[in-house]
Image (cartoon, coloured by chain):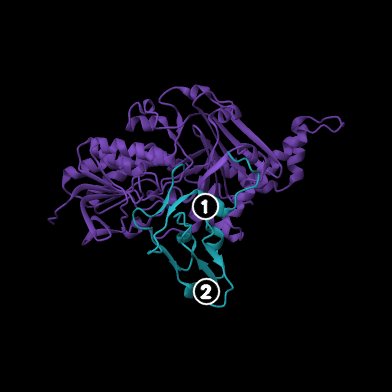
């Protein structure tokens, strides 16, 4: 097979996964092009959003010295359970996370993605915005490039980093069209809130950040709310399991609005002015529903590879995107040296990925997504815990019982004991 | 800064997001024949975060649901959610569609 190639590697999508691959390749002197359908990197992207400092530091050493890279470093994590008019919050204040390279940092995607894309460009990658890749170019059973309108761009390897909507992965015959039960819908609002107010409200020092996961009060639909502090904005949203949402015949934007009516959420958003509304699908099939990660002339990274984890305490997307992109870049460098771009060589990517923390985490928590579909987590458990605290703390003039006696009595009275035991067993097995 | 306590309507929320509409190209189209013949659940109406899918009872409507792509946030929910293959889903052409600035 003799082909004329325009580039060594063509990457579809300039999000964290695509740019991470491009940066890795460009640093090694590989001719790399990234095709981005948005007006700039991050223009089409929606996420929480936070990422791990150590991973970013590997890609861009001393990233924190550039103030455009991140918003705040995370020192406070809250997990809140909501029921009608009540809430219980676990508040982990971890100020020792204030050391570089930082444990986690919040980012604004249009800003962060563009900043990261600039790094890839500085390293020598070419980034083409406003370029929609509609299809792949085939030579028999080998993918040899991409198509955008009438334009054909030939490359020895194509890296698909198209995100959660896997249209090219399906065209590459690496996955079938996915099912709604393996997806959630995320809706997000960005609010302007003065820096001083953010810091006062959440007891943060300069540049420290807080993030809050919120379970319950979502009409019994598996999912949950999220809240991240940026410098002068906050990112707030609600994630809903698609299948349950439609079976309940509830409209997504209305469920979101009702969620915002809870007094706990109202306090989070007090005095804040909404400046943007966005939404996107989130792959939640987990380890068992990832597509095939490689084919003849092709590698798949990030959300497109289904590399998203929801394990309650750990909600990962950008980190896995950065890591899988980096691993794909490293594998591609070796594959190119063999002059063989078929599956025989591209499988190296999967071999390397299996050694990465991202793949291992997905495997460790492979039962988590199924566990978190258990509807009891989103109604019964928040009701039980908020109700229990109310019972224990209410002063009504009667002599108190021992705390343990009260608690056990309350749990028995609430019923669904078998369901609760099953849930606990599920938690032990999957988390 | 406005501190009005009244929640924003969905239209007001969508107005905040910058969308460059391609007047000559509807990136998503539905097939009302399929909707009429096969659909009983109308998942698109419930799933769409931008209310692009609406029930209609207009006499001249070709199917039970009407769709308008103008406010589309390109989230892809309808592509995944429609069990009948009635949604022909493509992205807007390069440079068109949503442009998030703060997300």
Q: Is residue A283 visible?
A: no
Q: Colour of chain A?
A: purple
What's the residue at 38%, 32% (across, down)? A55
Give how far across and how far down residue A226 sits, in percent.
Answer: 55, 41
Residue A160 drawn at (x, y percent): 32, 50
Location of mark 2 (residue): B63
Secondary element type, mark 1: helix
Chain to which mark 2 belongs: B
User: Within 10 angstroms of label 1, few (less than 14), some, or many (20 or more) residues?
Assistant: many
Q: Say which label, 2 or 1, has the lower sequence index.
A: 1
Labels 2 and 1 touching (C-beta < 8 A): no
Task: Assign the N terminus of chain A to one quadrant of the image.
Answer: bottom left
In this rendering, the answer to whether A149 lies above or below A317 is below
Is residue A40 something that shows in the picture?
yes
Question: How dense is the environment of label 2, judged by Cα within 10 Å: few (below 14), some, or many (20 and up)?
Answer: many
Q: Residue furthest bottom?
A: B59
Which residue, given by chain and number where applicable, does mark 1 sit on? B14
Residue under the point 56% across and 31% down: A198
Q: As drawn, which residue projects farthest toward the front? A: B1
Q: Position of residue A313 (x, y in %)?
A: 53, 37
Question: What residue appears at the point 77 percent right and 32 percent down from the top-left corner?
Answer: A393
Using the image, determine if residue A412 lies above or below residue A203.
below
A365 or A279: nearer the viewer: A279
Query: Residue A22 at x, y = what percent?
Result: 28, 41
B31, above or below A73, in the image: below
C-alpha gap between disc 2 and disc 1: 26 Å
**Chain assignment, label 1:** B
- The answer to whether residue B100 is left or right of residue A234 is left
A275 or A77: nearer the viewer: A275
Q: Secondary structure at mark 2?
A: loop
Q: Is residue A61 left or right of residue A94?
A: left
- In the rendered image, what is the letter of the chain coloured cyan? B
């Amino acid at each position: 097979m003799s082909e004329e190639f325009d580039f060594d590697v063509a990457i579809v999508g300039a999000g964290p996964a695509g740019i991470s691959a491009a940066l890795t390749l460009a640093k090694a002197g590989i001719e790399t092009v990234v095709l981005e359908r948005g007006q700039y990197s991050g223009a089409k992207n929606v996420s929480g959003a936070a990422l791990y400092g150590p991973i970013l530091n590997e890609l861009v050493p001393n990233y924190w010295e550039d103030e455009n890279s991140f918003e705040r470093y995370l020192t406070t994590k809250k997990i809140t359970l909501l029921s009608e008019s009540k809430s219980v919050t676990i508040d982990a204040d971890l100020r020792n996370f204030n050391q570089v390279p930082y444990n986690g940092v919040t980012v604004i995607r249009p800003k962060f993605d563009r900043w990261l894309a600039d790094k890839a460009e500085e390293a020598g990658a070419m980034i083409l915005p406003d370029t929609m890749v509609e299809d792949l170019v085939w030579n028999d059973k080998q993918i040899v490039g991409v198509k955008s309108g009438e334009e054909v761009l030939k490359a020895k390897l194509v890296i698909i980093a198209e995100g959660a909507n896997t249209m090219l992965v399906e065209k590459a015959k690496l996955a079938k069209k996915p099912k709604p039960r393996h997806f959630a819908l995320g809706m997000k609002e960005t609010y302007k809130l003065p820096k001083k107010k953010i810091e006062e409200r959440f007891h943060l020092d300069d540049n420290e950040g807080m993030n809050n996961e919120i379970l319950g009060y979502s009409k019994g639909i598996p999912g949950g709310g999220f809240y991240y502090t940026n410098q002068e904005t906050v990112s707030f949203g609600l994630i809903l399991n698609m299948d349950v949402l439609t079976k309940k015949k509830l409209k997504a934007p209305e469920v979101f609005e009702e969620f915002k009516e809870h007094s706990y959420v109202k306090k989070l958003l007090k005095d804040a002015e909404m400046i943007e509304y966005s939404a996107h699908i989130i792959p939640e099939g987990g380890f068992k529903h990832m597509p095939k990660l490689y084919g003849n002339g092709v590698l798949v990274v990030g959300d497109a590879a289904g590399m998203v984890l929801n394990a309650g305490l750990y909600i990962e997307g950008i980190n896995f995107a950065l890591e899988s992109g980096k691993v794909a870049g490293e594998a591609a460098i070796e594959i190119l040296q063999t002059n063989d771009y078929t599956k025989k060589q591209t499988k190296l990517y999967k071999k390397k990925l299996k050694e990465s923390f991202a793949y291992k985490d997905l495997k460790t928590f492979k039962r988590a997504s199924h566990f978190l579909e258990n509807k009891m987590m989103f109604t019964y458990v928040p009701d039980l815990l908020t109700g229990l605290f109310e019972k224990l703390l209410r002063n009504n003039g009667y002599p108190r019982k021992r705390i343990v006696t009260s608690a056990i009595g309350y749990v028995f009275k609430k019923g669904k004991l078998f369901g609760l035991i099953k849930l606990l067993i599920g938690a032990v097995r999957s988390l | 800064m406005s501190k009005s306590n009244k929640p924003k309507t969905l239209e007001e929320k969508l107005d905040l997001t910058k969308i460059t509409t391609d007047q000559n190209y509807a990136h998503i189209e539905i097939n009302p024949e399929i909707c009429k013949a096969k659909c009983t659940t109308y998942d698109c109406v419930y799933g769409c975060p931008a209310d692009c899918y609406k029930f209609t009872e207009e006499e001249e409507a070709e199917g039970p649901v009407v769709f308008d792509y103008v406010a589309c946030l390109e989230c892809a929910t309808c592509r995944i959610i429609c069990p009948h293959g009635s949604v022909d889903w493509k992205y807007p052409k390069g440079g068109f569609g949503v442009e998030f600035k703060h997300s």
